[in-house]
Amino acid sequence: MATGKQLKGTILARRAAKGPRKKRTRPKPRQYTIADLERARDRVAAAERRIDNDRTNNPNRGRAGLERAQLELSVIESQLRLRGRRAARRNLVPQADLPAQQSNNCVRAVHRPERGSYAKEI
């Protein structure tokens, strides 16, 4: 059997090995896909069907499920819309980066990030 001092020494040694306690880091937000969007639309439609097929006199029955599904759908749509805008911005070519042979006598919409507007190049 171990004495009290021996136990205390092993407990302190274990605690020191763990390292300092830190704040919990939050996970990054989920990156939704088109499949998630379709699944969320199906969930909203299913919740609406459940409310429509309900035969009870309670008008709020199933309403929470529908609102939860609608909220998730709006989150997914807004994230995909935001990511779509960022991808579209990456695909636009600034005027200074155009090669010389592409710019002769062709009309092209060019995004100028410093001005925030679109200009036609001739």
Image (cartoon, helix red, strand yellow):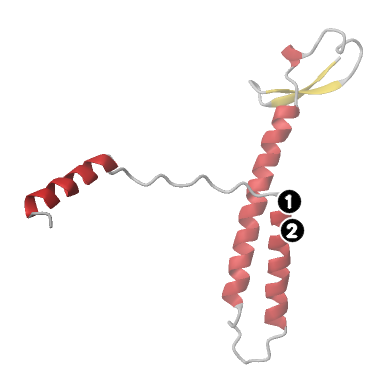
Q: Which mark is residue 38?
A: 2
Q: Is mark 2 on a helix, strand or loop?
A: helix
Q: Say above or below: 60 vs 45.
A: below
Q: Which residue has dot 1 on it?
A: 34
Which residue occupies the foreground of this view, 10 or 82? 10
The C terminus lies in quadrant: top right
Amino acid on which disc 1 is placed: Ile
Q: Which residue is drawn at 90% across and 16% down?
A: 106
Q: Say above or below: 38 vs 29.
A: below
User: Does 8 sit left or right of 37 as displayed?
Assistant: left
- The quadrant holding residue 116 is top right
Q: Which residue is drawn at 78% across and 13% down?
A: 98
- The quadrant holding residue 89 is top right
User: Does 61 sit left or right of 102 as displayed?
Assistant: left
Amino acid on which disc 2 is placed: Glu
Q: Does residue 20 show up?
A: no
Marks 1 and 2, Cα distance to the nearest angstrom? 6 Å
Q: What element carries label 1?
A: helix
Q: Do the residues labelled 1 and 2 touch (CB within 8 Å)?
A: yes
Which residue occupies the foreground of this view, 100 or 37? 37
Percent across and percent down for residue 20 are 26, 40
Q: Does residue 53 show up?
A: yes
User: Does 13 sit left or right of 39 as displayed?
Assistant: left
